Image: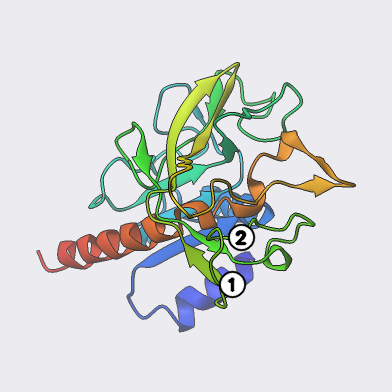
């Protein structure tokens, strides 16, 4: 990973800004790369932003830094050189005591797992611009989505957008810090009132995983808009 990063910087970057995005184990590897090769070093100037999703990024409780000393959590759409990190759970199914996500590792004393809502960087609840897999085989789960529209035609595209159906908010509960996702069900609306995305093993939902399979999908539209805004801000800063 380090060799690939250094090769990219030496031969492919040609002065451009960099957005680093990873999920789950990939986010864990990126966290190590950023901590060892970017944080506090001259190359940090190239960092537009980092998205470390589906991993427990330790930060000081209530703070903006921790694992990274000079790369804070993002708080504004035009902020650059910052990080977005979160794990997701259904609002009505918070992390159980044995959850593997939403908590900093024991060795990270006085720290918590970071949570930044891409749809509301300053905090609070906001609608999520999700792009969800239209069929279960894209989820890597045995769980099949319910029909997207009651009595409607089958969705033929790989992904589907559901405006207004989902909202998210970073919450702290029972020692966990996570993106709580609410499904805004409306029986009068012909659209589905639920979403797939849980890890299902032998017909049983593994609650300690939360919505890990769709962490990125839940806010993909918000992430895309945020990267666009941050990229524009990074370029503008080079013109000063």
The answer to whether 167 is drawn above or below residue 62 in the figure is: below
Q: Give whichever of 79, 121 is nearer the camera.
A: 121
Residue 161 percent across, percent down from the top left? 45, 62
Mark identifier at residue 76? none
Residue drawn at x 90%, y 47% as measured from the top left = 202
Tell which of 68 and 173 is nearer to you: 173
Read off the residue under disc 1: 154
- Residue corresponding to mark 2: 147
- Residue 4, position in %: x, y? 60, 73
Left/right placement of residue 20 relative to residue 74 reads right
For residue 187, above or below residue 15: above
How far across and down, in percent of the image, does residue 58 sit?
55, 33
Lower sequence index among marks 1 and 2: 2
Q: Secondary structure at mark 1?
A: loop
Q: Which secondary structure lies at badge 2? A: loop
Q: Residue furthest left?
A: 240
Q: How is the image coloured?
A: rainbow
Tell me what residue is drawn at x 70 percent, y 46 percent. 198
Callout 1–callout 2 Cβ contact below 8 Å: yes
For disc 2, the neighbor class at 10 Å (few under 14, some 14 to 19, many from 20) is: some
Q: CA distance from mark 1 to mark 2?
A: 7 Å
Q: Vertically, is 155 above or below 50?
A: below
Quadrant location of the C terminus in the rendered image: bottom left
Q: Residue furthest right?
A: 202
Residue 72 quadrant:
top left
Expressed as whole percent of the image width and height from the top left, the position of residue 29 reads 64, 54
Comparing 30 with 180, the one in front is: 180
Residue extending farthest to the bottom is 11
Indicate left or right for 176 with 138 as reference: left
Residue at 59% in and 50% down: 195
């Amino acid at each position: 990973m380090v060799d690939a990063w250094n090769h990219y910087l030496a031969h492919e970057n040609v002065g451009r800004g960099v957005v680093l995005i990873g999920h789950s184990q990939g986010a864990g590897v990126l966290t190590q790369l950023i901590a060892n090769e970017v944080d506090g070093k001259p190359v940090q100037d190239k960092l537009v932003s980092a998205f470390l999703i589906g991993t427990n990024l330790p930060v000081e409780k209530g703070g903006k830094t921790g694992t990274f000393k000079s790369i804070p959590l993002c708080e504004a759409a035009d902020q650059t050189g910052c990080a977005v990190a979160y794990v997701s759970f259904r609002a009505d199914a918070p992390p159980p005591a044995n959850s593997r996500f939403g908590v900093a590792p024991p060795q990270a004393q006085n720290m918590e797992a970071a949570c930044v809502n891409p749809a509301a960087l300053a905090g609070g609840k906001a609608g999520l611009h999700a792009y969800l897999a239209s069929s279960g085989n894209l989820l890597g789960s045995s769980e099949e989505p319910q029909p997207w529209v009651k009595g409607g035609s089958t969705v033929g595209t790989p992904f589907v957008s559901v405006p207004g159906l989902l909202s998210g908010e970073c919450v702290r509960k029972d020692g966990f810090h996570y993106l709580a996702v609410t499904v805004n069900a409306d029986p009068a609306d012909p659209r589905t009132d639920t979403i797939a995305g849980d890890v299902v093993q032998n017909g049983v939902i593994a609650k300690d995983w939360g919505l890990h399979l769709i962490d990125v999908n839940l806010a993909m539209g918000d992430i895309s808009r945020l990267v666009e805004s941050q990229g524009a801000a990074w370029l503008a800063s080079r013109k000063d």
